[in-house]
Image (tube, rainbow, N blue to C red):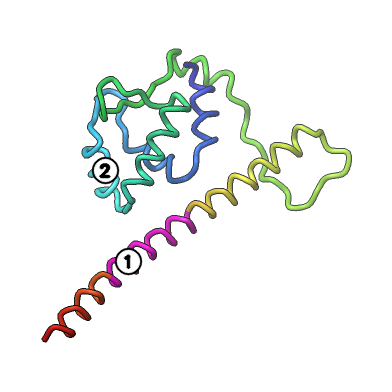
């Protein structure tokens, strides 16, 4: 796969999936637990279900491969980076906030896509926070139920 195609597919992933992808090595095949350990070592905490969803999304996109069951490896570019650097466009200016009259529709579409990606990342972060709070509340509720049960029997 060309490096430009890989970059395009990576940009289409959520921020959480990008974190998972960054922890998967190119040269080695890592197990499910090794990747989770690397994520934890990098300072992030992630529910296993969310991790499994990110792995599934990365597999579907073709950014990682599964040579063995529950062992993953990142897919690298098939062409050397030197060719891609020559084709790479010069840095684009920062997107403007308001609509530009008579602007190229593709430019406008690109700006909208950038905004949507940013919103999607915020939504993902909020969903993770909600899930973490839900899990914490469920654990606390279980402790309270056990305490209530003990108090009722004493």
Q: Where is residue 100 in the image (x, y as percent from the top left)?
A: 83, 45
View extreme (front): residue: 153
Q: Is residue 89 left or right of residue 149?
A: right
Q: Is residue 40 left or right of residue 153?
A: right
View extreme (left): residue: 154
| Inter-mark Cα distance, 1 to 2 | 23 Å
Q: In this view, does 59 lie to the left or right of 92?
A: left
Find out whether residue 98 is within the magenta segment: no
Q: Where is residue 135 in the image (x, y as percent from the top left)?
A: 34, 62
Residue under the image location 58 percent in, 24 percent down:
88
Residue 26, which numbered label?
A: none
Q: Where is residue 52 in the image (x, y as percent from the top left)?
A: 35, 40
Find out whether residue 137 is within the magenta segment: yes
Q: Crowding near pointer 1: few (<14 within 10 Å), some, many (20+)?
A: few
Contact, mark 1 vs mark 2 (Cβ under 8 Å): no
Q: Give the range drawn in magenta.
A: 125-141
| Element on which disc 1 rests | helix
- Dominant SS in magenta: helix
Q: How many labels does the image show?
A: 2
Which quarter of the rendering shows the C terminus? bottom left
Residue under the image location 46 percent in, 19 percent down:
81
Q: Which of marks 1 and 2 is nearer the N terminus?
A: 2
Instruction: Say which of 120 and 47 sits in front.
Output: 47
Residue under the image location 44 percent in, 24 percent down:
62
Q: Is residue 31 left or right of residue 105?
A: left
The residue that label 2 is drawn on is 36
Q: Position of residue 12 (x, y in %)?
A: 54, 35
The residue that label 1 is drawn on is 138
Q: Crowding near pointer 2: few (<14 within 10 Å), some, many (20+)?
A: many
């Amino acid at each position: 796969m060309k490096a430009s195609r890989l970059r395009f597919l990576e940009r289409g992933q959520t921020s959480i999936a990008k974190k998972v992808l960054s922890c998967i090595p190119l040269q080695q095949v890592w197990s499910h637990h090794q990747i989770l350990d690397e994520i934890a070592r990098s300072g992030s905490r992630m529910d296993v279900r969310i991790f499994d969803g990110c792995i599934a999304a990365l597999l579907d996109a073709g950014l990682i491969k599964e040579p063995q069951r529950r062992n993953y490896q990142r897919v690298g570019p098939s062409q050397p980076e030197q060719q891609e650097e020559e084709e790479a466009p010069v840095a684009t200016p920062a997107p403007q906030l308001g609509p530009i009259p008579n602007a190229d529709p593709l430019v406008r579409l690109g700006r909208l896509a950038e905004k949507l990606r940013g919103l999607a990342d915020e939504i993902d972060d909020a969903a993770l926070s909600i899930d973490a709070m839900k899990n914490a509340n469920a654990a606390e509720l279980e402790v309270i139920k056990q305490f209530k049960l003990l108090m009722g029997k004493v």
